[in-house]
Image: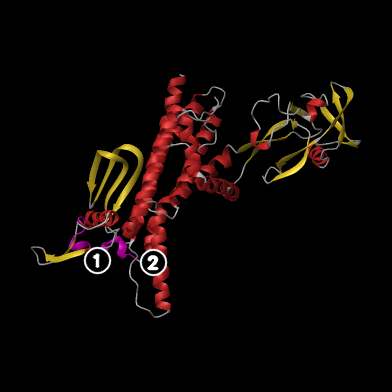
Amino acid sequence: MTVLLYTLGVLAFAVAILASIGLHELGHMIPAKRFGGKVTQYFIGFGPTVWSKQVGETEYGLKAIPLGGYVKIVGMLPPGAEQLGQVSYDAQGNQVTRVRKSNTGMFTQLISDARAAEWELVGPEDSDRLFYKMASWKKIVVMAGGPTVNLLIAFVVFWIVFATYGVKTLDVAPGAPVVAEVSQCVLPYTEEGRACTPSDPAAPAAAAGLRPGDVITSFNGTKVTDWEQLRTLIRGNADGTAVIGYDRDGQQLTGRTSTTVEARPTSATDQTLRQVGFLGVSPRTTVVTEHGGPIYTLDQMGTMTKESLSALLHLPVRVWGVAKAIVGLEERSVDSPISIVGGGRIAGETVSDTDFGAGEKVAYLAMLVGGFNLFIGLFNFVPLLPLDGGHIASALWEWIRRGLARLTRRPDPGYVDAARLLPVAYVVGSFLLIMGVVLIVADLVVPVSTGA
């Protein structure tokens, strides 16, 4: 049964991601067609074609490697003036523009080859349907359509989960401060979780004789009624003497120690580190369930977006850390980036875990799919080719400079030639390929586990 549930979890995640990919590509194709563009292909996956069907002028199909998808919109790259060859005519007497396939310089040759490949698909009848000739705002809508769909998928998924299952978080149990855990040593905040070593100083709470289950009743003569009050007293004590009154199984006891000064986050929401008094006790917590609607969902997604953008900024460094984990140079971090393979593995572990109820499994799987869509949507808005954001940036720059030309009554500068940015696209594309391989290998060799 466990193997069956694991397989079911992997398949459910895979189907959800493939559906997200398909909807992403529809986000490009539908507005492209509505604006009069010519879309010749709509495919999910890469590599050899598994199945396809021609409907009108568009071929729809599936590829063998389900790690992405694409739509082919005719005329993405304009012909460069310096790249044009001789003008010829077809049998009907229509003028045909050919693009030379030879040039000098590696990048120049790559650009020329890309133009040639693009214009081999263009016929005389397509002259008014080329993507690069669309109004700039239309190009922005077309290219932003895909990642926007991913963000909408994430919003809908999160909204459903928040409105039904809710958000379950650990919060400090109400009432008198009950000690749930006593630190045996003082560890820097960035190293919390590792085992104590003989060189680590003993924590003040352990030195005072506190144990889990003790109820703290006073601190330096001040009566304590809740955990927040105790926390404020401890932090404000710096490295001073601490006289702690506590109740253990109905017996009133007193412990004497001195708090130490350590760098700790300002609050649960503000992770700025500050030097404050430290005792080394953790509160007893309780599970709190919070439900919310669309406004709550947007607020939660705002927090997730900030975290995702931070992860994007540090992505190359974090992928390098994953690469080192593959060869055994360091442990793989539990919050390291994962591939779709890793996501499928986590989905399988979650669904097959007997400690989770059916509702928890469905909610976790949905949040996993929503999280992937949020990250994919944000990632595709990065303003670098070959990502959608690179095309958006080109169209936006075209819109700005043509608008400025009109305002200043200068000649129209024409279309922005995205082909000139292809060297950047090749570099970024190479990084994406390497990153994908590294993460997939890591997810197979040193996977991130749910701990189930």
How many numbered discs, if any?
Answer: 2
Asked if residue 57 lies left or right of residue 217, the reply is left
Residue 344 in sight in this render: no
Nearest the eye: 204 or 116: 204
- Residue labelled with disc 1: 82
Task: Establish if 182 lies above or below 240.
Answer: above
Per the image, label 2 sits on a secondary structure element best described as helix
Q: How dense is the environment of label 2, judged by Cα within 10 Å: few (below 14), some, or many (20 and up)?
A: many
Residue extending furthest toward the right: 221
* Residue 43 image offset from top left, x and y in percent: 30, 44
- Along the viewing direction, whichever of 33 and 185 lies nearer the viewer: 185
Q: Is residue 121 magenta?
A: yes
Q: Which quadrant is home to the N terminus?
A: top left
Look at discs 2 and 1 and give the one toward the viewer.
1
Disc 1 marks which amino acid?
A: Glu
- Cα gap from disc 2 to disc 1, whole angstroms: 20 Å
**Quadrant for the C terminus in the image:** top right
**Mark 2 = which residue?**
398
Considering every residue shown, the one lying at the far top of the view is 1
What is the magenta segment's predominant secondary structure? helix
Q: Which residues are magenta?
A: 120-134
Binning the other alpha carbons within 10 Å of mark 1 as few (below 14), some (14 to 19) or many (20 upward) gives few
Tell me: 354 left or right of 23: right
